Image: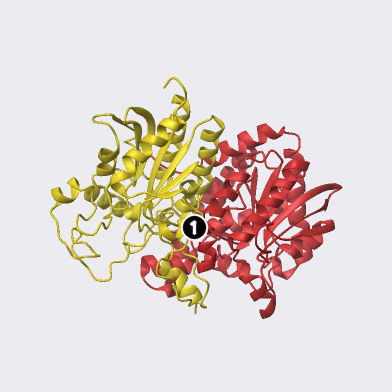
Chain colours: A yellow, B red
Amino acid sequence: MSSPRIDVSIEHRDAPEPPERKHPNTCPRCDSHYRDDELDAALWVCPHCGHHFPMKARARIASLVDDGAFVEEAADLRSEDPLGFFDLRPYPERLAEAELKTGLGEAMVIGQARIDGTACELSVMDFSFMGGSMGSAVGEKFSRACDSAAERGVPLLSVSASGGARMQEGILALMQLPKTVAAVEDLKDSGGALISVIAHPTTGGVLASFASLGDIVLAEPNALMSFAGPRVVQQTTREKLPDDFGLSESNYRFGHIDRVVPRPELRSCVARLLRLFAKNGD
Amino acid sequence: MATEHELHVRHRLARLRTLKLLGGARLSAEVEKLQRQLERLAEETTDEDIWRSVELARHQDRPYTLDYVERLLDDWFELHGDRGRADDHAIVAGIGRFDGRTVAVVGQQKGRDIKDRIDRNFGSAHPEGYRKAMRVMELANRHDFPLITLVDTPGAYPGVAAEQHGQGGAIARSHALMARLEIPTVACIIGEGGSGGASALALTDRVLMQEHAIYSVISPEGCAAILWRDAGEAKKAAAAFKPDALHCLELGVVDAIVPEPEGGAHNDPDEAGRLLGESVRETLEELEAVPGDELKRRRRARFRSLGVFA
């Protein structure tokens, strides 16, 4: 029936490919196992081998901002179901489930923040909410973060972790690429800066839009950062993939990012940049 | 039943008329013909018809970008290379005369026979292709040439070299450049509008779409493979995410539908070219009356309004 075609899927996959199902707190690289509070204290970096575990949006924000210096915006924004999408289950059911699982209303949290004394706007994605996929609500939140940063004349710090556009919203999900890019251009026209931090994994539509457009682009070690995921590339081309295919280190070598920053150094690195970009008098 | 259906059709047509006025895109001069087309479409958006659009959009005889260039432009001068690394044949770009003015045209190009298809990489561009597109867009912006883009790609190419050369960043920057242009820009989806590789050429003042083209976030096969875990369920996936022209119009993603000859553009490429040319001509005439910075402002506002949320 269906002829074999080039599969250009750039969409979210379930997980950053675990070879076998391990407990989420077991290090996939060295098999060390930790309690939640141990990992929390270590910024979700394996104290033994340095592997970076995925970090939830709330934990990420806490790790970056000054004590109590985060005021969330657009917290009530929720996805709708414009297509009445139904695959194996209805889309609204998946949304409700994701909200229960993560305690988040969407795959992105935005708000006003202060980092080491410097004011900024913050947008942080959470991969555990439907693979961090970008639908209308994520696109709108990011756009509002751009506007909020522009209005207050502060830089926007974006931390992305996403499998790409959210298929369940069809073409409107794709339209979040031009939408977020237009918002970034408005921010840049206002004199505002965008600092983009790529966390594992950032693929598909998010990489192909705002995440790549930072005045500065940083990435965490070993983060997958590719337009098409390794499986899609493998299936389409039958090429042997390099061991470091699409990883941040490889992207650094090819000139796509400014720096690979280990998580324990991220806060001080970002704080320095924010000070360098801050308008005089702030 | 019949009455209900009729109401549905009327409601849709009424919506289309308002959209048309709001968008300001006057479609074809042959309004009646268009309405007949739209009525037919409105009556026909069953799952079967969505799949028919998928098949027609990919039809091997469907006119491609250069088929339209040949019919619509005089004195076409194709430009080659990204001035950095390569000339990607999956994207064609150039300048020529359209209706007495110089315009720039950029679009994906598929191949006809097997050799040609491989040369064009089945219309799937590498980053070099998007960089070539950007170079020509900048040229157009500098010289005040209106930009016409023709979108026809299954998607940007997913390969090792494409990733190493920065596929994601190239697509992002192509979007960004189009959001900065201060010239009239119009895109038409003429076949497959596949994902970010397609929207990278379609951040324009007006987005047109041929009647049987598709525009989607992912290929039906890709969606089926992920959500149904079976690429064979492509038909089901297409019915679920609705990539057809009428749904795109209803969602405000495209501004107008360009009618095709009976049975699809491949049945009469000359007539398909004439209909496309007419829509592009009217759209450009309308846009040329607006100052460049105002076009840019409205273009960004248009895309920033897309999405459904609560």
The residue lying toward the viewer, choosing from B271 and A155, is: A155
The residue wearing badge 1 is B217
Q: Going 16% across and 62% down the picture, which residue do you hit?
A: A32
Q: Position of residue A2 (x, y in %)?
A: 50, 77
Please say if B58 is above or below A247. below
Looking at the image, the residue that sits furthest to the top is A281
Residue neighbourhood size for the residue with mark 1, other residues' Cα within 10 Å, grouped as few (<14), some (14–19), many (≥20): many
Residue B85 appears anywhere in the view: yes
Instruction: Report which quarter residue B297 is drawn in.
Output: top right
Q: Position of residue B193 (x, y in %)?
A: 58, 59
Secondary structure type for disc 1: loop
Q: Position of residue B20 (x, y in %)?
A: 63, 42
Q: Chain of mark 1?
A: B
Please say if B18 is above or below A280. below
Q: Is residue B105 left or right of residue A29?
A: right
Q: Is residue B219 left or right of residue B273?
A: left
Q: Is residue A49 left or right of residue A14?
A: left
